[in-house]
Image (cartoon, rainbow, N blue to C red):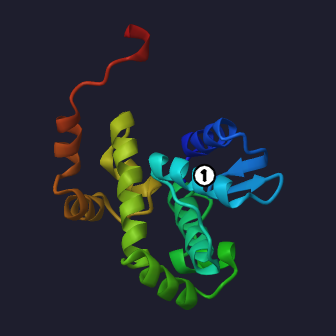
Amino acid sequence: MVCRHCVQALENALRELDIPYREVGIGYADTVSALSVPQLRSLDAALADLGFGRIDSAEQSLVERAKRAVMHHVRDEAECRLKLSACIEEQVGVSFDTISRMFSQLEGRTIEKYHIAQKVERVKELLAYGGRTLEEIADITGYSSASHLSRQFKAVTGLTPTQFVNARGERTSLDKV
């Protein structure tokens, strides 16, 4: 889960399954009591329908915490000017080497590649909103220059930022819908 919409989807699923919970946040749900095996099966099916999965090991939990740290690093770049490795270590409380090794084993890609993918997704959002130059977006997302952002964006998406914006077409104001 990576956003408030994901949290809302999980809350809805728990309500539909009549599973009482105390709190749901990004990457976790605190249920009132332990779940029975039938409840777990129903929850797993509901999560799969939403494109989620339940974390049931310490290693998976560590990787999810690392993903949240990467998201924090990408989304709150102005607040988190630490190097990625230092940011992750600070938020997760485990050495970067350990996290990196576990991440690669469970995810099948490096944490650095995950970080780049998340940065490109953030760039896509900022491009879609409009109103900012590529230089401003590069600064917001922690790229050293607009050209570096463009090269990495094209390597990940196959499009330049300009091609991406042009492919999206005109935005429709919600006031006009």
Which residue is at the far top?
Answer: 176
The answer to whether residue 2 is visible is no
Q: How many marks?
A: 1
Taking 5 as reference, is 139 above or below it? below
For residue 166, side relative to residue 175 (left or right): left
> As shown in the figure, which amino acid type bears the numbered disc 1?
Leu
Residue 174 located left or right of residue 5: left
Quick check: 13 above or below 101? above
Please provide percent x and percent y for residue 96: 56, 86
Q: Quadrant of residue 158?
A: bottom left
**Residue, x 73% and y 58% (percent of image)?**
36
Q: Nearer the viewer, residue 97 or 126?
A: 97
**Label 1 Cα neighbours within 10 Å, binned few <14 / some 14-19 / many ≥20:** many
As drawn, the residue found furthest toward the front would be 38
Element on which disc 1 rests: helix
- Residue 67, above or below 29: below
| Position in image of residue 17 (x %, y %) | 66, 41
Task: Tell me what residue is drawn at x 26 percent, y 58 percent.
Answer: 153
Give residue 86's position: percent from left, percent from top: 59, 79
Q: Which residue is mark 1?
A: 43
Residue drawn 48% across and 46% down? 50
Can residue 99 be seen here? yes
Instruction: Reply above or below: 89 against 17.
Output: below
Looking at the image, which is closer to me, 70 or 21? Answer: 21
The answer to which image quadrant residue 82 occupies is bottom right
Q: Which quadrant of the rendered structure holds the C terminus?
A: top left
| Left or right: 26 as drawn, with respect to 100 | right
Taking depth in this image into account, of 61 and 77 the one nearest to the observer is 61
Where in the figure is residue 76, as x and y percent of width and height? 57, 56
Q: Is residue 126 left or right of residue 40?
A: left
> Which residue is at 57% across, 68% downward?
64
